[in-house]
Amino acid sequence: MARSAFFFAAGIWIVQQFPQLPDDWHWLASACVLIGILLRLKFRKAATFLFGMLWAIVFASIALSNRLPIDLESKIIPIQGRITGLPRQSDRRVRFNLTDIQGPEGIPKKLRLSWYNPKDEIKAGQYWSFSVKLKRPHGNLNPGGFDYERWLLSEGIGATGYVRDRPSPVMVSDKSSFFNISTWRQQLSDKLNNAGVSSDTIGIIKALAIGDRQELSSAQWNIFRNTGTVHLIAISGLHIGLISGLIYLTVVKFWARTGVLRLSPHHAGALAALFIAALYASLAGFSVPTQRALIMLAAVMFSVIWQRNVILSNTLALALFAVLSMDPLAILSPGFWLSFLAVIFIVFIAGGRLQETNRWLAALKIHWAMALALAPVLLFFFQQTSLIAPLANLIAVPVVSFLVVPILLPSMFLLGPIPELAEPLLLVVDTILKGLFWFLAELADWPFAILSYPQPTLIAVAFFVLGVFILLTPRGLGGRWLGCLMLCPLFFPSLDRPEDGGVKLTLLDVGQGLATVVQTAKHVLVFDTGIRFDSGSDSGISVLLPFLHYHGIDRVDKLIISHGDNDHIGGAASLLRGIRTDAVLSSVPERIDHVSADFCRTGQSWLWDGVSFIMLAPDETASFRSNNDNSCVLKVVTEQGSILLTGDIEKNVEAWLIEKYAYDLLADILIVPHHGSKTSSMHAFLQAVSPSYALIPSGYKNRFGFPHQEVIERLDDLNINWFDTGRHGALTVTTTKRTLKLEAQRLAHRRYWHASP
């Protein structure tokens, strides 16, 4: 069964690499016939592989058919629907999912909406009537970045949008079905807010109790991430297994004392454990780890009921089949790989060993072995891993698993009917978590707590994991030394750096903002840092740092903030906190916190690895009043070609640049000023620069209408090839001594769930 599960998963994984799905349904009949032939010929592995591909294609086709029709995009649509999941609150905005939708034909079954400055408190289970403006699933697409479009597809969300204030939204009903799990979670969340728990731990308690991690602060996330304990701050498979085991043993002992013989104690314990596990998993929204844990637990408990022996490999294979059958896209999730690999390693390390060892030494071995084995997977997905995770988990896992969760779960059951009993238990949990968090915070401050590394190849990851397996085999088996050799490829990453005299520029897709990374052979420059959002997140956290880690960059030699608008300076603080930055230039140095910044001025220049950097503006003698016109303007010159970065300058500065520099403005690549606003990119300026490519940093269907149609027409009139980040994703220009190449992320790395350019 394990081999069949492997080939089924392999078939599903192959489909996730497709740039587009087959659009002719004749392939379905052909695939079914071929599977039948392979089964008849007893080629079961090939048939299972093909069946995995077939199921992934069918699942994806059905999911894609639920997307918003193009003719409804950006139109005002009256709808009614019920809020599901826990709404995400911020200072000015609440985000939520909407289901049970009534509206025009073609409206998807599930929407992701934002509501700015709502007058009412938004809660799960409410049924609302309002007007919305929707757009098809679309997200920023960058190397090393989060794929929002894939997440929307896996969540079954067919459109995103926002609620309009006119006509005024109306709550139709605030009552929902008794069996609506979202309502239960909302009620528990509200009761926890009033339970007297401190603000320092309320986010952690909600994460462990109802799977809601939105109230964790960025500082808390950093500590959990740096100590490798993020997996504990959720309703995980470990917690479900532990609680189920405790329930099973308790019910077995209690039932044996009742003398009821119609149902044996073991049967009663197994059914009770399954019920509690299902209830606990539902509070987490049935995430991949909880799905896997619940399926494996069900297999074990039913074997108890039917009095059958359990083969762990078959149980794990069954969980793999079930998880991927429910959601083939789960195979691309980090949680999928970390969850299954963790279970495999625990079983491999703890089972089948004849030598008796001290329990503490055995626990320590499991922790360091798990940290070693899962490190390449973490590096592949996040380009970071914690070096102190074994020590942190050695303390945190027992505290959370044997103290916090066993006290927290009964307190949640008591919170509704008998809050007087629940609140003292929650205060005990609060005290324990404060002590644990203090310990983790101390560990997180250790130097070299986190290892940042370029993304390894899949082959290097596979060899490393297999090498750890070999090293963990029992002593006495030959060939264990091969495990050391198989670890080696991970330590020799392939770094895609420009050659001397060349440059690599990446205009990142940060929505309606600007963030650019310029790399030479040994240096890195960041020009602007994107936007800061009302939710507290920003482009520095979500785009810039992941991009730099993805490419193995651990230092920025120079940061330039062109001017002080939020869509250019918004991610600067996060970038400066997250990575060493040697120098900062800006037209508004007083706006840069925590570092000493200098003014950018005309005439500044430097040479890196055969590449010249020249600051063209602003000029102290020129008197431009607006922030936009005082933007830093930088020219990058290589042997093969040159690049002009312009910030948000408008027509007055464009005219000044033409007068001051004339032919020196010529550039092969132009980062179009002010996101393609019609007040910039005048015909004379475009003619003076005369670029081969014009790159426009603009958000998809942004409210400003950038790039403006007039600008597009000017570019077309001058036969200038143009690309914009909203439609094409991140744009990368690479120059060498021989060529100049441009790559659009949405074209070069397209997957079937990505919106077409």
Image: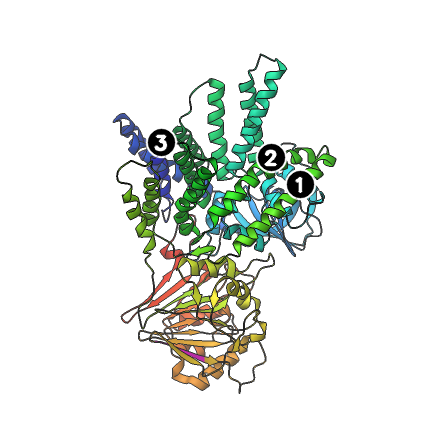
Q: Which percent across, then down, holds residue 468?
A: 35, 43
Above or below 68: residue 410: above
Q: Residues within 10 Å of mark 3 (few under 14, many from 20)?
A: some
Say whether residue 738 is left or right of residue 106: left
State the residue in front, 90 or 361: 361
Q: Amino acid at mark 3?
A: Ala
* Residue underneath mark 1: 428
Residue 539: percent from the left, percent from the top? Answer: 51, 61
Badge 2 crowding class, 10 Å Cα cut-off, few under 14, some 14 to 19, many 20 or more, is some
Indicate left or right for 255 with 578 as reference.
right
Judge depth for marks 2 and 3 and give the one in front: 2
Q: Which element is circle 1 on?
A: helix
According to the picture, the residue beneath numbered tag 3 turns out to be 2
Q: Residue at x 34, y 61 (%)?
A: 496
Tag 2's secondary structure?
A: helix
Extreme residue in the bottom direction: 621
Q: Magenta part of the protein: which range?
A: 611-615
> What residue is shown with label 2?
406
Measured as percent of width and height from the top left, residue 450 is found at: 46, 55
Q: Which of disc 3 and disc 2 is earlier in sequence?
A: 3
| Identity, as a three-letter code, of the amino acid under mark 1 | Val
